[in-house]
């Protein structure tokens, strides 16, 4: 995708800082440990921007700050030109459905006591339920049968498809994909990646993808940021990152990556 043609980013994160309190028993001052340090990036409509980096580098903290699950210490997060960090709770709630997260742990994302049909009913307006449920199932490659199933009766890949279909049920524009395919075996992972590629096209979606796995990232991303210890080391279009990595750490990641 040529981002120069798309002047307005859908998401713009500027100098984001996220910190967590440290348990320092006995100390007088409360200490904080930074997890995200001065991170800035833009995502343009229709693009997949990926953040790759080792476990604990701060990837999920960025997603959690966008969703308001953790409070950012500094910075701004502009979504459709509004700073999510400054919005009133009411305005935030109105915008928030446009941003849907898909987390790594689909077992936690689905209520084990609800049938899949009821899980969909929760988010769909009554008059559209039947038609939209059929449409969502079809787009996620699921059969109608599973509506009567409980989550534990589905395979890992099916559960992840349900999570994706549910995220799409509220017509989001931006999906935040936090390690969306790591929990499955390779063949299922490839299917989920293919599903994400087709959903992005058919639903005009924009993706923020975070993963420790460059093999997955390179199947989906248009641009990639490399993150280490809370900071972005570099961000480049995918092809350029692979052919001309600036940092030794990026080179290490590339060398460790098996070609897809
Ligand atoms: N709620 C929390 N309280 C305290 N520290 C936290 C909290 N959440 C994350 N951290 C710390 O912040 C740092 C970044 O964590 P984060 O979950 O953002 O990393 P990550 O890149 O998503 O890792 P992974 O690839 O394992 O999911 C880590 O050192 C982690 O221990
Ligand atoms: Mg994480």
Image: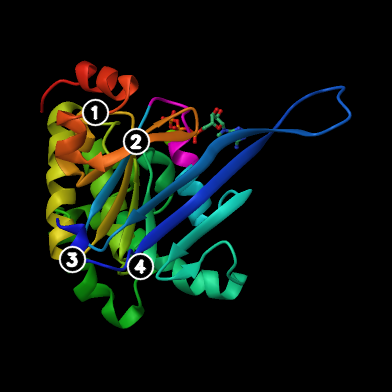
Q: Earlier in the sequence, mark 2 or mark 4?
A: 4
Could you say which quadrant of the image residue 122 lies in?
bottom left
Element at label 4: helix
Residue in the image at 39% along x and 38% along y: 105
- In the rendered view, tell whether residue 176 sits above or below residue 180: below
Front residue (pair 90, 126):
90
Q: Which residue is mark 1?
A: 245
176 left or right of 197 in image: right
Q: CA distance from mark 3 to mark 4?
A: 39 Å
- In the rendered view, tell whether residue 51 sits above or below residue 2: above
Q: Which residue is mark 4?
A: 121
Q: CA distance from mark 2 to mark 4?
A: 42 Å
Q: CA distance from mark 4 to mark 1?
A: 46 Å
Q: Which residue is mark 3?
A: 5
Task: Tell me, yes or no, whether the two marked residues, 1 and 2, touch with CB atoms within 8 Å.
Answer: yes
Estimate how packed mark 4 is, as few (under 14), some (14 to 19) or many (20 or more) residues with alpha carbons within 10 Å: some
Q: Which residue is mark 2?
A: 234
Does the image show residue 107? Answer: yes
């Amino acid at each position: 995708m040529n981002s120069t043609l798309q002047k307005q980013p859908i998401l713009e994160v500027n100098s984001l800082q996220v910190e967590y309190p440290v348990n320092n028993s006995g100390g007088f001052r409360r200490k904080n440990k930074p997890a995200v340090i001065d991170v800035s990036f833009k995502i343009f409509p229709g693009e997949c921007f990926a953040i790759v980096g080792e476990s604990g580098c701060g990837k999920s903290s960025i997603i959690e700050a966008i969703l308001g699950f953790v409070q950012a210490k500094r910075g701004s997060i502009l979504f459709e030109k509004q700073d999510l960090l400054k919005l009133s709770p009411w305005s935030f709630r109105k915008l928030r459905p446009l941003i849907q997260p898909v987390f790594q742990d689909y077992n936690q994302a689905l209520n084990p006591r609800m049938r899949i049909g009821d899980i969909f009913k929760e988010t769909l307006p009554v008059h559209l339920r039947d038609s939209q449920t059929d449409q969502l199932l079809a787009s996620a490659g699921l059969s109608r049968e599973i509506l009567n199933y409980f989550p534990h009766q589905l395979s890992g890949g099916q559960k992840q498809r349900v999570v994706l279909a549910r995220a799409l049920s509220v017509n989001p524009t931006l999906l935040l994909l936090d390690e969306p395919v790591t929990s499955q075996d390779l063949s299922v992972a490839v299917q989920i990646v293919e599903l994400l590629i087709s959903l992005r096209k058919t639903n005009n979606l924009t993706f923020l993808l975070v993963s420790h796995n460059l093999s997955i990232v390179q199947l989906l991303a248009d641009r990639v940021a490399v993150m280490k210890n809370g900071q972005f080391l570099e961000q480049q279009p995918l092809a350029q990152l692979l052919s001309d990595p600036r940092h030794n750490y990026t080179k290490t990641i590339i060398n460790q990556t098996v070609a897809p």
